């Protein structure tokens, strides 16, 4: 039990590593003062370009994926495996190293999903890509993507995983509350990934 608890704490600390702040900072960009001011992959992408942005997203995915995968390999009980993923996402959203001001947890949630069920992760990614390319609203694509993964988890019969994703979905919607207001008022920023990649 002690090992599992320590692992959950470590998962929070790893999840708190702000790659979406660190990598742009190396380029001289402070994402807290650019764009939305959010310490997340989307803002890093807008502020520092595709290379740094997508690398930040990949590392945000990797930190939760690795912690959950290792918990599984070490044979921890399913509750602690799921907790390690949940707290890694919470660490991303509320990082101790950044005075608890972090990102919105979408990439880290994807890493958690990928470590538990790759098919659910593919469902999330498919919906996210379709909506991002068609609507250009990353926030909308992210929330619907997590919601779709939540439904898939229950369809696969993974009840505990489903409830973990329900919590993360609610957390994600809360973290996107400003985006939701802008979407309702027609003021949400769009992001054209194709043009962004062509220009760089």
Image: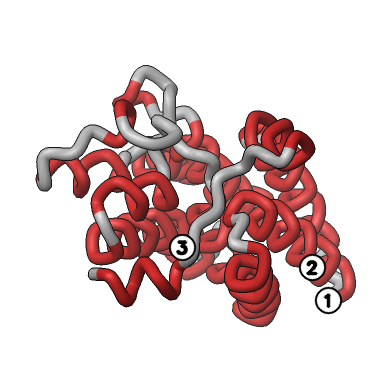
Residue 1 shows up from this direction: no
Q: Position of residue 61 (x, y in %)?
A: 43, 60
Give SS at disc 1.
loop
Give SS at disc 3.
helix
Q: Does residue 20 lie above or below 9 as drawn?
A: below
Looking at marks 3 and 2 on the same chain, the residue that comes earlier in the sequence is marked by 3
Q: Which residue is mark 1?
A: 156
Q: Position of residue 147 (x, y in %)?
A: 78, 57
Residue 172 shows up from this direction: yes
The mark found on residue 153 in the picture is: 2
For the point 35% across and 54% down, which residue is it? 45
Q: Position of residue 3 (x, y in %)?
A: 45, 44
On screen, residue 98 versus residue 1, left or right, reads left
Task: Tell me the quadrant of the picture where the C terminus can be found.
Answer: bottom left
Give SS at disc 2.
helix
Q: Are marks 1 and 3 in contact (CB under 8 Å)?
A: no
Comparing 168 with 53, the one in front is: 53
Q: How far apart, in angstroms, are the residues tagged by discs 3 and 2?
A: 17 Å
Q: Are marks 1 and 2 in contact (CB under 8 Å)?
A: yes
Task: Tell me the quadrant of the picture where the N terminus can be found.
Answer: top right
Q: How far apart, in angstroms, are the residues tagged by discs 1 and 3?
A: 20 Å
Quadrant for residue 131, please give it: bottom right
Q: Position of residue 140 (x, y in %)?
A: 69, 53
């Amino acid at each position: 039990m002690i090992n599992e608890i320590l692992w959950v704490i470590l998962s929070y600390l790893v999840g708190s590593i702000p790659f979406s702040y660190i990598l742009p900072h190396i380029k001289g960009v402070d994402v807290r003062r650019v764009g939305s001011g959010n310490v997340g992959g989307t803002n890093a992408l807008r502020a520092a370009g595709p290379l740094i942005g997508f690398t930040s997203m990949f590392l945000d995915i990797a930190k939760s994926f690795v912690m959950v995968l290792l918990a599984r390999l070490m044979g921890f009980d399913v509750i602690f495996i799921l907790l390690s993923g949940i707290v890694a996402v919470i660490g991303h959203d509320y990082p101790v190293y950044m005075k608890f001001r972090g990102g919105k947890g979408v990439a880290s949630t994807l890493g958690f999903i990928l470590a538990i069920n790759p098919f659910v992760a593919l469902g999330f990614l498919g919906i996210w890509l379709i909506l991002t390319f068609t609507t250009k609203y990353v926030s909308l694509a992210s929330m619907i993507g997590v919601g779709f993964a939540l439904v898939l988890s229950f369809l696969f019969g993974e009840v505990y995983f489903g409830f973990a994703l329900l919590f993360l979905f609610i957390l994600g919607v809360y973290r996107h509350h400003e985006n939701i207001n802008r979407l309702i008022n027609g003021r949400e920023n769009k992001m054209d990934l194709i043009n962004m990649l062509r220009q760089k």
